[in-house]
Image (cartoon, helix red, strand yellow):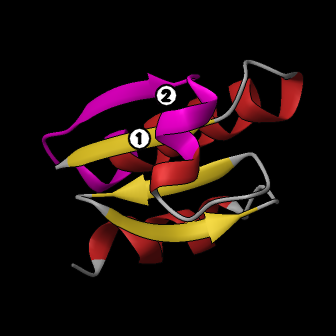
Amino acid sequence: MKIQILGTGCPKCKALGEAAEHAAKDLGIAYEIEKVTDIEKIMSFGVMMTPALVVDGDVKVVGKIPSGEELKVMLGSK
């Protein structure tokens, strides 16, 4: 599973990355995390607000940090 965190590196972006990684570990799934900081690349996903979470190319959440349980649902349901 490829997890991408879209954002410029702000505290919320870092928190989303940490939360997503924690949820993936809790689920026991194989994953890789990529932090996307380039504005052009972020916009190519159709995202205009950060932080954003992309799972296997599918934008799951924009502009907020979901709870751990919400993240587990997003990562567990492909």
Residue 48, position as x, y percentages in the image = 74, 58
What span is in magenta?
25-42
Spot the residue most to the right. 11
Front one among 2 and 46: 46
Indicate which disc, 1 or 2, sits on the residue closer to the N terminus. Answer: 1
> Would you identify the image quadrant in which residue 13 lies?
top right
Q: Is residue 22 visible?
A: no
Task: Tell me the number on the disc at residue 4.
Answer: 1
Percent coordinates x, y for residue 58 in the rendering: 34, 69
Relative placement, left or right, of 2 versus 41 is left
Amino acid on which the number 1 mark rests in the picture: Gln
Residue 47 falls within the magenta-colored stretch: no
Counting other residues with Cα less than 10 Å from the Cα at mark 1, is it few (<14), some (14-19), or many (20 or more)?
A: many
Q: Residue at coordinates 23% horizontally, 58% vertically from top-left?
A: 56
How many marks the image carries: the answer is: 2
Quadrant (top left, top right, bottom left, bottom right) of the C terminus: bottom left
Q: Is residue 18 above or below residue 68?
A: above
Going by the image, does 72 lie left or right of 24? right
Classify residue 78 as left or right of residue 45.
left
Is residue 24 depicted above or below 31 in this figure?
A: below
Marks 1 and 2 close (CB-CB < 8 Å): yes
Give the numbered dot on residue 36.
2
| Mark 2, other Cα within 10 Å: few <14 / some 14–19 / many ≥20 | some
- Element carrying mark 1: strand
Left or right of 39: which side holds 33? left
Marks 1 and 2 sit apart, C-alpha to C-alpha, by: 7 Å
Provide residue 69's location: percent of width, then percent of height: 60, 70
Q: Position of residue 33 (x, y in %)?
A: 34, 29
